[in-house]
């Protein structure tokens, strides 16, 4: 594992540990306004994440459940609920790539341990969440403001640590209210490029779940422009995160 990826994983694990210890993800203050429907939404989200963690729900079923839960959520209501404006004011969006913050919620009674954490992603126009795949984690992106070009790929083979074989699955514009998700075996690889200035996304993330029980989650940055089409799909190199940012973090 390269040094940049190792540092990323250490930081993410540290953030999750802090969130779990507090009983909620504590970094970005939530707004004072608390629509009851959004309280209920996040109780349901946590229930689905709990069922996933204990094996009572499959990851594809989790993806479908989250899509159903967020389908009728007004993006601006959720933006106010998490105090997106206050969060955005404290963030400096980079020239390449994306800036993120952990999101805290009002003191909702989750009825048990919090099984997920939440983040806000901010991008300037033309900047990207660079193409990458995942192992042993699930997440979803909900567009709050702006829009992005969303590309997702299914994984055909990742037995070679230097190269994945992937197959295109999604290529569309994601607008406010749209949700996408990833899992090891469905839409694992994603790549999002902001089309507006700025674009804001809200994420729900669950770590250390997937097709390799007992293995920690991992992120793999990929180079689709260097891919080679073959009989099984597109063979793409695995690259360091700094190389991925240099190539894909900003539109040329």
Image: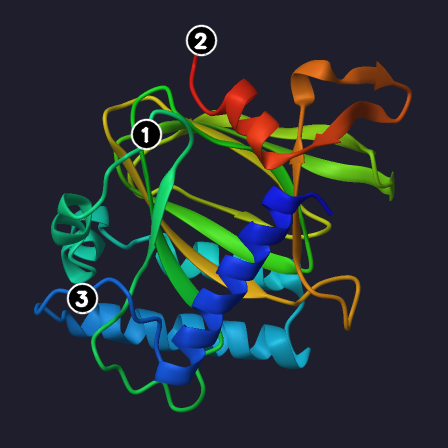
State the residue in front, 177 or 89: 89
**Of the two numbered discs 3 and 1 in the rendering, the one whose residue sits closer to the viewer:** 3
Q: Position of residue 185 (x, y in %)?
A: 73, 50
Q: Is residue 82 left or right of residue 169?
A: left
Residue shown at 43% from the left, 47% from the top: 141
- The number of numbered discs placed on residues in the rendered structure image is 3
Q: Position of residue 42 (x, y in %)?
A: 34, 71
Residue shown at 24% from the left, 68% from the top: 38
Quarter the C terminus occupies: top left
**Of the two numbered discs 1 and 2 in the rendering, the one whose residue sits closer to the viewer:** 2
Residue under label 1: 147
CA neighbours of label 1 inside 10 A, class few (<14), some (14 to 19), many (20+): many
Residue under label 3: 30
Q: Please tell me which of labels 2 and 3 falls first in the chain.
A: 3
Residue under label 2: 252
Q: Is residue 116 visible?
A: no
Alpha carbon distance from label 1 to label 2: 19 Å
The residue positioned farthest toward the left in the image shown: 32
Alpha carbon distance from label 3 to label 1: 23 Å
Relative height, residue 38 to residue 219 (above, below): below
State the residue in front, 190 or 5: 5
User: Marks 1 and 2: CB-CB under 8 Å?
Assistant: no
């Amino acid at each position: 594992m390269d040094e940049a990826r190792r540092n990323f994983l250490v930081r993410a694990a540290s953030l999750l540990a802090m969130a779990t210890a507090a009983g909620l993800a504590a970094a970005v203050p939530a707004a004072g306004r608390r629509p009851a429907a959004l309280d209920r939404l996040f109780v349901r989200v946590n229930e689905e994440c709990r069922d996933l963690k204990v094996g009572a729900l499959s990851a594809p079923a989790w993806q479908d459940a989250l899509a159903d839960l967020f389908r009728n959520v007004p993006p601006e209501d959720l933006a106010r609920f998490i105090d997106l404006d206050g969060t955005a004011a404290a963030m400096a969006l980079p020239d390449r790539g994306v800036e993120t913050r952990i999101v805290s919620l009002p003191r909702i009674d989750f009825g048990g341990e919090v099984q997920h954490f939440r983040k806000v992603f901010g991008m300037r126009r033309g900047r990207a969440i660079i193409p990458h795949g995942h192992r042993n984690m699930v997440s979803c992106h909900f567009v709050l403001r702006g829009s992005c070009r969303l590309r997702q790929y299914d994984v055909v083979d990742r037995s070679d640590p230097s190269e994945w074989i992937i197959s295109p699955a999604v290529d569309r514009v994601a607008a406010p209210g749209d949700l996408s998700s990833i899992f090891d075996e469905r839409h694992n690889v994603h790549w999002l490029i902001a089309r507006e200035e700025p674009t804001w996304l809200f994420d729900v993330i669950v770590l250390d779940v997937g097709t390799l029980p007992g293995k920690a989650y991992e992120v793999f940055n990929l180079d689709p422009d260097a891919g080679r089409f073959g009989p099984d799909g597109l063979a793409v190199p695995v690259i360091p995160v700094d190389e991925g940012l240099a190539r894909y973090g900003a539109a040329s």
